[in-house]
Image: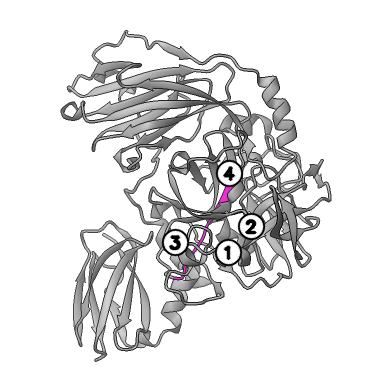
Amino acid sequence: MKKLIFLTVLIFLTYSSAAQVTNEGSPKSWDADMLTDKKEALVTISMPSFDLLKIQKEDAINDLDRSKVYRFGYEFDVDLGLKNAGTWNQLSNGDWIWRIRIQSKQAKTLNFVFDTYKLPKGASLYLYSADKTDLLGAYTDSFNRKDEMLGTWMVQGDDIIIEYYVPASKKNEGKLNISKVVHGYRSVTDFDIQQKGLNDSGSCNQDVDCPVGSDFDDIKDNLKRGVGLMVVGSSGFCTGTLINNTSNDGAPYFLSANHCFENNENGTTQNPAIWAFRFNWISPNPSCATVTNSTNGTFNQTTSGATILANNTESDVLLLNIDSNLPESWDLYWAGWDRSGVAPSFSVGIHHPTGDIMKVCRENQSTPQTAINFNGNPSVEVWVVEDWDLGVTEPGSSGSALFDPNGRIIGQLAGGQAACAGTNDNGLLDVYGRFSVSWDFGSTNNTRLSNWLDPGNTGRTTLNSLSEELLLSVEDNELDKNIIVYPNPSNGIFNISNSAITNLSYIVYNFVGQQVASGELADQNTVVDISAQTDGVYFMTITNGSTNAQVTKKIAIDN
């Protein structure tokens, strides 16, 4: 346990410039000295009214069906871009900003889909409420995709300004066009949490930092760092979990439910390129099955864009690759898994019900497996949680992982009728698609998990979390006795002492699995220079070419 804590501390001290919404800095227009025309008012583009009562009646029915995505917003189709809307202003230094003001009356939040998003290097995009009380950004060129799509996270309020900054020399290089404005009519926001406590989620829910038992609390404290709230189809919520693979390379794989992709309110499939993700959204003051307010957390770790790797309806599984890199400073956690199909003695779920702050639930009995009629499929293979002993799930929890007593994923939430009845649950069941079925269902890579989570075809039945696997490789491998890396930490230049083992090679990875260096090791001493990399934790995998034995060394750059 001490070694795990050490690794966590080191990771937390690192940082990355990869694609992320930094929520740092501020729009150029907020600096009054930068604007050349300080009096020009932005024209407000107002969204039309819509039949909210009809939408709420639909939600009242759909929310009873856990196999449907929890909808939080109403989508307006628009066509608003740099060439046909908004206002350009030149700044005092010659650079430019483009701003557009969008209003949708009585919206709790607004979020947006860009069907064209291509920013040149040095440009940035911010979204903020007109009263400047909520700010999201900056989005940069690191979010550029080949399909030029982007979906944003939510900004509080019904009156939002989008501001694009571009250096003068690159004014004609950028492309932006908004295709959807999403009116959030029951979104979870900072305002809601402060004013209404648990918002839409029931009062029997347990915040993730509530105790679930001494046999799992330490495991839970790690697992929660890999659970994310996901905006699907720009107006719905699901939950998912970062999942490890046998390469232990930190690939940004995210496990959720297939119905989050296929079964939205319009009955059509979604485009994950516009999905947005939020991690580590945890209340610092846990509310444990009470009506006491859950206060908001300090982290706002959001990113956008994903690609589907595998999905099927047989176990209602969806595996995504989050396309924007996940910063090391977020201190995320890749969970392990168990594909044996053996029923656990107890199980735990971690999730975001109705898009609320992260919650936890526990079932103390062994979880039976069966086949049910689900989402039009007459024989979906599932685990059945007959009656939660602690907490509950709700719409929006869909796709969240079911963990065994070792903290390994054995399934993901597919459906059910469990809900709150005051501060107690209603005693009804939930069903989870089984990981053992998801593993090798179908005959192609895009229907099963095996090719993605065991790319080297090791045949492993269980896998620990990324952190545990990397530590175990250090502790248990014979090579470790013969290889010394020093100084560690260093300024990026490491000496590798090799006690006469021949045919050794090395690869250095950063914490999100990107290769940053490689080479051969001499018989006695080799110098590895990665001083061009940023401060943080790295992993050096050393391979014996004669025996294929490997050892992984944690190394750290600290300037």
Dot in front, 3 or 1:
1
Checking the image for residue 441, the label placed there is: 1
Q: Are marks 3 and 2 in contact (CB under 8 Å)?
A: no
Where residue 63 appears, as percent x and y from the top left, is 71, 37
Does residue 241 belong to the magenta stretch?
A: yes
Q: What amino acid does circle 4 point to?
A: Glu
Q: Find out whether the residues at labels 2 and 4 contact each other: C-beta distance under 8 Å.
A: no
Q: Which mark is residue 262?
A: 4
Relative to 117, say whether 538 is above or below. below
What range of the chain is rendered magenta?
239-246
Quarter of the view holding residue 124: top left
- Residue 495 falls within the magenta-colored stretch: no
- Judging by the rendered image, the residue that carries numbered circle 3 is 9
Question: What residue is pinned by disc 2?
Answer: 314
Q: Position of residue 164 (x, y in %)?
A: 32, 26
What's the distance in space between the residues labelled 2 and 4, CA to CA? 13 Å
